[in-house]
Amino acid sequence: MNALKLKKGSTSHSAYNLRPTFSDTIEQHTLAVVVDNEAGVLARVIGLFSGRGYNIESLTVAEVDHTGKRSRITIVTRGTPQVIEQIKAQLGRIVPVHQVNDLTVEGPTVERELALIKVAGDGDKRVEALRLADIFRAKVVDSTLSSFTFELTGTPDKIDAFAELMRPLGLAELARTGVAALSRGEG
Amino acid sequence: MARQMSGAKMVVQALRDQGVDTVFGYPGGAVLPIYDEIFQQNDIRHILVRHEQAAVHAAEGYARSTGKPGVALVTSGPGATNAVTGLTDALMDSIPLIVLSGQVPTFMIGTDGFQEADTVGITRPCTKHNWLVQDTEDLPRLLHAAFHVATSGRPGPVLVDIPKDVQFATGTYTPKPKASEFRYQPPVKGDMEEITELVAALETAKKPVFYTGGGVINSGPAASQLLRELVEATGAPITSTLMGLGAYPASGDKWLGMLGMHGLYEANMAMHDCDLMICVGARFDDRITGRTDAFSPHSVKAHIDIDPSSINKIIHVDFPIVGDVAHVLEDLLRVWKARGRKMDREALAKWWQRIEGWKTKNCLAYRNSETIIKPQYALERLEALTKGMDRYITTEVGQHQMWAAQFLHFDDPNRWMTSGGLGTMGYGFPASVGVQQAHPGALVINVAGEASWLMNMQEMGTAMQYGLPVKQFILNNERLGMVRQWQQLLHGERYSSSWSESLPDFVKLAEAFGAKGIQCSDPADLDDAIMEMINYDGPVIFDCLVEKHENCFPMIPSGKAHNEMLLGDASTEGAIQAGGAVLV
Ligand SMILES: Cc1cc2nc3c(=O)[nH]c(=O)nc-3n(C[C@H](O)[C@H](O)[C@H](O)COP(=O)(O)OP(=O)(O)OC[C@H]3O[C@@H](n4cnc5c(N)ncnc54)[C@H](O)[C@@H]3O)c2cc1C
Ligand SMILES: Cc1ncc(C[n+]2csc(CCOP(=O)(O)OP(=O)(O)O)c2C)c(N)n1
């Protein structure tokens, strides 16, 4: 369990806040869901969101414990506090789900996303793209005489900002992984 | 004791190890190896239904009336898709089922093979969980897990999809593990701090009410027993949803009757005016709450439920308690007793006075007739003539279902089987088959509307083949009565397609199957006809010709508050001034 770096004590049940504040404010939450890596588990999670009309802003999934066959799904979702609580409770009810952690309420988190950004252009625009990439610490992973492909890691906001800057400079293609997130500190 | 055997043999062995005595099913190519094994043994009885939907409803009836999980077996493709309505029904009503489906062999999956359907994909949203078995070695583990998941926590239907090659191949059978060996372990004990806070609230409540539901039945007989003890000891009034009828006896003096859209006036008024609502295994369904922002506006609310997602889903509660009803009620009673069995008896007496006032409205009153059988009268007579018998009731969906809930009384749990959450017309007949199979000597009656009944009428064949003496008590109004009522009240009396045209002659229909048919249209003959039905040793279709345009009251129109209930004119006569809030 510790290998997965999840908070101690936050079992799939204690993660629920059964006394949520009721309001109409839309909040964004990052949820970490540990699941048995069995066939169809991702379809179950996605089906829950589409079937009950919840939003998915971003979703990433990969096996994180090969021996235990566990995967970690990181979901960024939006909704009122009640809806967020329902989402967590509904996720917790899925049989192969081990844990649901609401990283947003469990304290400070580190969130990172990876993006590949292809920018095509020449002359001043090309120079400017390279200069900005340097400021953002984006790496050039492929280049031709008329294009660059950058690799950039950072918060979703940082990637948004970089993509916006590249748009007038010839942004041709953008691929993003979605957010991976962990809570800060020891456990 | 691990043993080598074929997948098909494993299925039968696992069912045996799980204590299964009956399987409802229908064969086809993709389950032939399993049928072959069933043929070669005598421990498990297979009931051949006439449609896979009926197999699942029969398994539901079996499960609800015994407290054990029901089992159904269907073939791939159309067999599995026919099971979808039953699965959804069981999911909505939290009924534990294990449905086994055949599948094309693993090497053909994805090729649009003959009778291939993506069964796990199709049934994912209508099961609690499902698996496609890829390897015979996994089969015993998954079969045992299916029983564990279906019956633990909030019960529900589980489907195991078994490709034909997995049935033929040999593997190692592993016996039923201990329940504690599974990872899936929903908690059953409630939080003691919350329970203690609730006890404190109960001690000082002036107008408490227990609002109980299907979760009490799901929890088992101990839960009903503890509920009775709690209600008697505290003296607080109790109402129940459609799904919870029988958990507290209808003959008990704290009983207010069913609540909700077609619930009793006193039950709904008590919910609206209470100061402490204790919800026990119910889920604040929209048939209960009416307009949510006007739902019991001045009460403190507690909710005991095993599924955290039921809590705060619709209604914000003050005391959320996640746990199994029996476990939580046991702790609640213990704490309340230890703290001195306190209640505000004086306030409670006043609260009962108000409730007695509401009762005088006599909300179930109807105008009887000497010439036409009123559906309510038919049910009153059925109740009177079957009282004290070892009786189980199933229903179809519609007005007759609501009248049955109002006019039949249940003193024990597991005696009332109805499709609440999904409202599946066609549920009642196959469910009655399942109940009768589980309780061979009992009187099993399906209270039906003629339209619903026709939806699974092919099950007459099953009832006859297995000598299941189910009584089909059809309140025949020649209308899709519930639809007609809504059209009358809410759609300007435009009766769009709500007639039952071209009905069969039900007596001849019964005879065509070799069963008994009885028709009755005169109130004076009704008692004799009902007795004839009860005393006949075999399946009966009872065609009770009733008033065609009777409406089911009380009724809270959708989107209205509890105190905006419509009452029938028989009960509002002279009473309108008394309750100014009642809209008629
Ligand atoms: C035509 C029609 C009209 C209807 N009108 C009415 C009406 O007037 N009144 C009415 O009441 N209903 C009515 N219904 C039924 C209604 O739609 C719902 O099915 C019903 O109200 C739900 O009952 P429930 O709240 O008891 O929940 P159920 O569906 O029985 O759910 C049980 C709840 O208990 C929980 N639970 C399960 N097991 C346990 C356990 N061991 N321990 C603790 N908790 C547990 C579950 O998580 C769930 O939250 C009508 C249906 C139809 C078809
Ligand atoms: C499978 C299905 N289709 C449609 C409905 C909608 N519906 C609810 S009640 C009803 C009419 C039922 O008529 P009947 O069985 O004769 O009973 P009555 O209301 O007349 O007592 C209908 C069509 C449903 N509940 N289930």
Image (spheres, coloured by chain):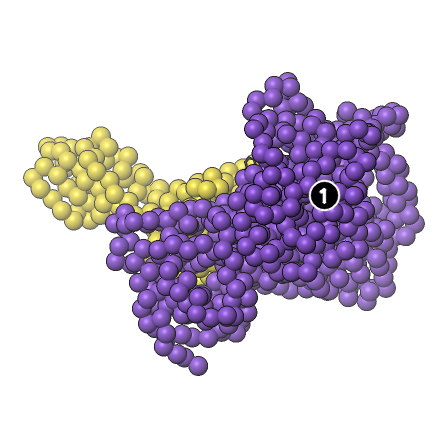
Chain colours: A yellow, B purple
Count of all numbered marks drawn on residues in the image? 1
- Residue B265 x/y as whole percent: 79, 36
Relative horizontal placement of residue A172, taking residue B10 as reference (left or right): left
- Residue B124 x/y as whole percent: 43, 50
Which quadrant of the figure contains the N terminus of chain B?
bottom left
> In this picture, is B442 found above or below B472?
below
> In this picture, is B490 found above or below B177?
above
Q: Quadrant of residue B472?
A: top right
Residue at the extreme left: A145
Residue nearest the viewer, comparing A41 with B536: B536
> In this picture, is A1 found above or below B318?
below
Q: Chain of mark 1?
A: B
Residue at the extreme bottom: B1
Q: Residue at x 44, y 62 (%)?
A: A6
Q: Residue at x 86, y 64 (%)?
A: B340
Q: Quadrant of residue B548?
A: top right
Query: Disc 1 on helix, strand or loop?
Result: helix
Determine if the C-beta at disc 1 is less than 8 A from ligand 1: yes
Which quadrant of the figure contains the C terminus of chain B?
top right
Relative horizontal placement of residue A134, taking residue B185 as reference (left or right): left
- Residue B121 x/y as whole percent: 38, 49
Residue B234 visible to an observer of this rendering: yes
Q: Which residue is mark 1?
A: B405
